[in-house]
Image (cartoon, helix red, strand yellow):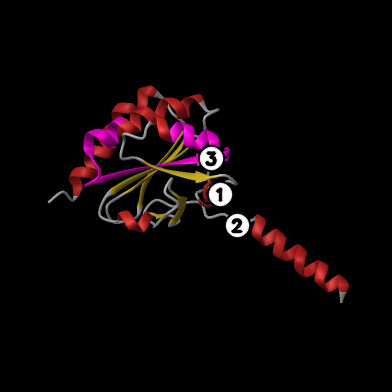
């Protein structure tokens, strides 16, 4: 009986470790993306009808720290009626998360916290910054890994085309 318990526990542990749901373009992304600074659950489905940009970032990631202010500026310019940027802090302490999110507190971006990397694992994040763009229909439109200033014009064009696609 003891051996059976060990085998059951081991198989349960291994199946939990392998939980991963890489996102697929054209399909709905993993819905639960953490809690905001106010403690409320954040779900992608809460923003159906808007373009949603989900980005995974960390303070130790210099490309992430270059990307965040740009996404912040985009969110400020577009507003929240048609776009919602959700920035998920990846595997960092709560103090750093609060510090960075506070510096952008005058912005309607939403900040979420993924201390253990569970949400990132569900999105198949292996490197950051990792951005997922969800269309108004609630399905993944594209995925961008890394950050390069040369790619900004095409990213802005992609966001603009999504914003205009069903804007009627």
Q: CA distance from mark 3 to mark 2?
A: 17 Å
Is disc 1 surrounded by few (<14), some (14 to 19) or many (20+) residues within 10 Å? some
The residue wearing badge 3 is: 90
Name which quarter of the figure residue 149 lies in.
top left
Q: Quadrant of the N terminus?
A: bottom right
Magenta span includes 91: yes
| SS under mark 3 | strand
Name which quarter of the figure residue 160 lies in.
top left
Q: Residue furthest left?
A: 168
- The front one of 158 and 69 is 69
The residue shown at (52%, 29%) is 59
Which region is colored magenta? 73-101
| SS under mark 2 | loop
Q: CA distance from mark 3 to mark 1?
A: 10 Å
- Mark 2 and 1 residues: CB-CB less than 8 Å, in contact? yes
- The front one of 103 and 1 is 103
The residue shown at (42%, 25%) is 66
Q: Is residue 12 above or below residue 56?
A: below
Q: First in sequence: mark 3 or mark 1? A: 3
Q: Is residue 109 above or below residue 148?
A: below
Q: Is residue 69 above or below residue 97?
A: above
- The front one of 58 and 4 is 58
The residue wearing badge 1 is: 121
| Residue 112, horizontal then vertical, whole percent | 45, 45
Is disc 3 surrounded by few (<14), some (14 to 19) or many (20+) residues within 10 Å? many
Using residue 111 as the reference point, say whether residue 18 is left or right of it.
Answer: right
User: Of circles 3 and 2, which is in front?
Assistant: 3
Q: Which mark is residue 19?
A: 2
């Amino acid at each position: 009986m003891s051996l059976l318990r060990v085998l059951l526990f081991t198989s349960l542990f291994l199946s939990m470790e392998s939980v991963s749901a890489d996102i697929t373009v054209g399909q709905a992304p993993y819905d639960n993306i953490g809690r905001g600074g106010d403690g409320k659950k954040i779900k992608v489905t809460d923003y159906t009808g808007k373009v949603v940009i989900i980005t995974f970032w960390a303070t130790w990631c210099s490309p992430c720290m270059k990307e965040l202010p740009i996404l912040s500026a985009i969110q400020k310019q577009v507003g929240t009626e048609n776009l919602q940027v959700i920035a998920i802090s990846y595997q960092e302490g709560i103090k750093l998360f609060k510090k960075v999110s506070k510096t952008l507190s005058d912005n309607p971006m939403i900040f979420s916290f993924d201390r253990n990397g569970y949400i990132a694992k569900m999105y198949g994040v292996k490197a950051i910054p990792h951005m997922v763009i969800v269309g108004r229909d609630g399905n993944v439109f594209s995925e961008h890994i890394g950050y390069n200033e040369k790619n900004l014009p095409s990213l802005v064009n992609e966001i603009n085309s999504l914003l205009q696609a069903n804007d009627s």
